[in-house]
Amino acid sequence: MIHFGELLMEIFNHYPQKNPDTASRTIDSEAVIVLPEKSQVHTLNPVATRIWELADGQHKLSEIISTLENEFDCPSDRIKSDSVEFVVTMIEQGLMRLADQPDQSDG
């Protein structure tokens, strides 16, 4: 049986990556994401936009969280919990995936 803490450590050590079928644009620090196959449009707040920008398959979630802790004036625990919640939601909606190794593609 996997305990919640172990599951969190697994998530922190994986590499979030955008679904390549999404299109996105950032306007005034807020990303607009479109997933054409599902006719979905999502607008992100500035913190979620920064996670989206860093979800390139090259950064572990723990590294993304460290970046956010340096860039935003918010308690560390809140950044961690909100980041995990956001990434899990994006995965559930088909907008992101988690990899256990960095992305090796050329771009």
Image (cartoon, rainbow, N blue to C red):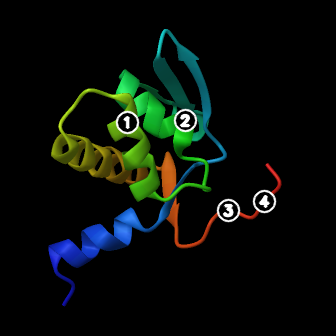
Tell me how far mark 2 sits from mark 3, CA to CA.
15 Å
Query: For mark 4, what is the residue?
Result: 105
* Residue plotted at (54% across, 42% down): 54
The front one of 92 and 80 is 80
* Residue plotted at (19% across, 73% down): 5
Mark 4, residues whose alpha carbon is within 10 Å: few (<14), some, or many (≥20)?
few
Tell me how far mark 1 sits from mark 2, CA to CA.
15 Å
Secondary structure under tag 1 reads: helix
- Of tags 4 and 1, the one toward the viewer is 1
Q: Earlier in the sequence, mark 3 or mark 1?
A: 1
Query: For mark 3, what is the residue?
Result: 103
Secondary structure under tag 4 reads: loop
In which quadrant of the rendered view does residue 71 lie?
Answer: top left
Proximity of marks 3 and 1: CB atoms separated by less than 8 Å? no
Q: How far across and how far down the image is residue 102, in percent?
A: 63, 65
Residue type marked 4: Ser
Disc number at residue 53? Answer: 2
Q: Earlier in the sequence, mark 1 or mark 2?
A: 2
Residue type marked 1: Asn
Residue type marked 2: Glu
Q: How far across and how far down the image is residue 39, in percent?
A: 52, 31
* Residue plotted at (47% across, 16% down): 29
Disc number at residue 70? Answer: 1
Tell me how far mark 3 sits from mark 4, CA to CA.
6 Å
